[in-house]
Amino acid sequence: MAMEAETKSLPANAYKPLAANESYQPIIPPQANEPELTWRSIAWGTFLCVLFTVASAYSGLKVGQVMEAAIPISILAIGLARVYARRSSVLENVIITGIGGGAGAVVAGAIFTLPALYILKLDPRPVQTIFICLSGGCLGVLFLIPLRRYFVRDMHGKLPYPEATAITEVLVTGEKGGSQAQLLLQATLISGIYDFFVTTFQVWKEFVSFQWVPIVRTLNERARFTLSFDAISFILGLGYVMGLRSSLILCAGGVMTNLGQVPLVFNVGQHAAGPVYPGNIPIAAMTAAQIYSKYVRFIGVGAIATAGIFGIAKSLKIVGSSFAIALRTFTRGEDKSTVRTDRDLPMITILAGVVVSAILVALLLGSLKVSWTVLALGLGLTLVFSFFFASVAANAIATTARNPVSGMTMLTIIISSVVLLRFGLSGTTGMFFVMAIAGMVCTALSVSGQSITDLKAGYWIGSTPSAQEKMKFLGVIAAASAAGLTIAMLAHTFQFGEAAVGDLRPVLASPQASIMKALVEGFMSRQPVAYVLFGVGSMITIALEMLGQPSLIFALGMYLPLELNTPALVGGFLSHLLNKRSEAAGGEAGSRIRERGVIIASGLMAGGALGGVFGAALRLFPWYKESLVHLPFYDNLPVSEVVSTVMFLALCGYVWFGSLKKKKES
């Protein structure tokens, strides 16, 4: 008979680094025998995965916005748990969330690359689109498993894991019920309504730039010096969970690029009469956003890539130990002593999976009728990039909940094109070959990032890692099949990218794929590469590593738009100040302040994700218009931005006073 483990709050050391002889004990202990892999959890997880995959694929192609699946599905899992006579265990809910959460990850990899094949008139077969998603997703899971202990266990308390924190708090708080569940529901409801209306309709401006202030407008016009702010609750909660140090470093990267490099490029290049590569219009005619997109963003890509190399070097020890375990397994047999909550899939299974995946990748690339040399290079690039980016994605998600998918995919296309061009691959075959590699790598790094979130949430709660890992493959299979078929079906009904002359089908913008299409088309036409910009980013990362600073967080800040970094910094300051208050209060009162702060921040993230899902869903209907809800002052920029600022400050006040409420009552 299953031993019923009492569900309680996360231990006090759940979010803190462990002392020398201290260990973390999850809320479901290793010796517990609670239901985990059941038909209920597997069936619901698969169903929700397919449902969110179809919806995410369509919304991503239409408006460039992929529906975030994991957090909404964790909330749905809590609701589904009460449908059955035997209430679902928290471990079953972890499995539902893990399987379903694969939807957003696979779709992100698919819509960045696969539509480009249709835009280029290469017309891939449905089996090819499914296989690209499937092979990339499986490689992402396989290459992440040997890194699990390093990122999840060894780095405990050293990485904030914002999204995993939100999922864990939703599952644990929802399981407990009581006042904390009410607090989580309240924060989720406030955030969901707030973000839904702000991002979906014309209530007040989502982005605050204060361009109506004369001095700010003058700085923008004369130096392209702009400061922007995305005033939504999701990023406020994200910054709170990240903490002050990480959010400061993240924002510092954005400050350097947007307030340093963009004005520098403008002031140096504005005197050039014509376009300066890789731009296509004179720099003097560019806005700050265009300068960032055409020049400075590539510096961020170079910085992220170099930070990833350092990350791989730092994790080589754990990778080496993982392969040592595999070698020992071959000679002595599998070690059965590992406790349930620290048991991964056998290394033999992982190695066999990589070999099988490599064979299947080779079959796909070989079907394009290329030389054996090009085939070997393509296979090598796919495996190396997928392994390399697994660590980058895990580190990025664990730190900022932001996966640099587009930057790493661009880097894959650039390097693959440069290498393969030297071996004579070009034209339409070269474009298909490179985009197939990019599609698999993009899906791999996206799935790697999402998987580390699930594994960390499972670690906090007390799931069995091997069970989670098995179900990640099921989620990848379901999402890859649904995404590949959905994209192939939409390609018959819609045009991707821009409208073609004489084609009367409606258009799906496919913004990310359009960028990738332009990139691979330019390289296969043998256009030059802006190596200097990548090199500048690399040097910045090297300098940070020499100073002993976390370069990947800074590099992500360089790459992400500044308006996403600034509200995270506000959340980080709130977290810092409330933690100071909790330390001053001490004891049970201080613990309540910390706990309520994390619950409210998690609710803001959960509600923001739900609001984004509903907003994206509305955009799928032909009758939808942003002006359906239009407040009178929306078009008055000064009033609208001031209202936005006041409402964001009200959210900050809610976090502050909501966290301190229990202390005041006591």
Image (cartoon, helix red, strand yellow):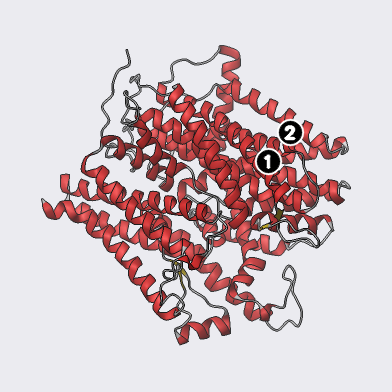
Q: Which type of secondary structure does the marked residue at label 1 adopt?
A: helix
Task: In the rendered view, tell whether residue 537 sits above or below residue 591.
Answer: below
Question: Which residue: 59% across, 48% down?
Answer: 308
Question: Which residue: 65% across, 61% down?
Answer: 298
Q: Quadrant of the N terminus?
A: top left
Q: Which residue position is annotated with label 1?
A: 440
Residue 128 position by quadrant:
top right
Residue 442 position by quadrant:
top right
Question: Which residue: 65% across, 50% down?
Answer: 112
Crowd rating for badge 1 (residues with CA inside 10 Å; few <14, some 14–19, many 20+): many
Three-letter residue code for mark 2: Val
Q: Position of residue 12 (x, y in %)?
A: 27, 39
Residue 618 located left or right of residue 415: left
Residue 215 located left or right of residue 493: left
Q: Position of residue 130 (x, y in %)?
A: 68, 36
Residue 38 located left or right of residue 124: left
Mark positioned earlier in the residue sequence (2 or 1): 2
**Marks 1 and 2: in contact by CB < 8 Å?**
yes
Q: Which type of secondary structure does the marked residue at label 2 adopt?
A: helix
Q: Distance from label 2 to label 1 (Cα)?
A: 9 Å
Q: Which residue position is annotated with label 2?
A: 361
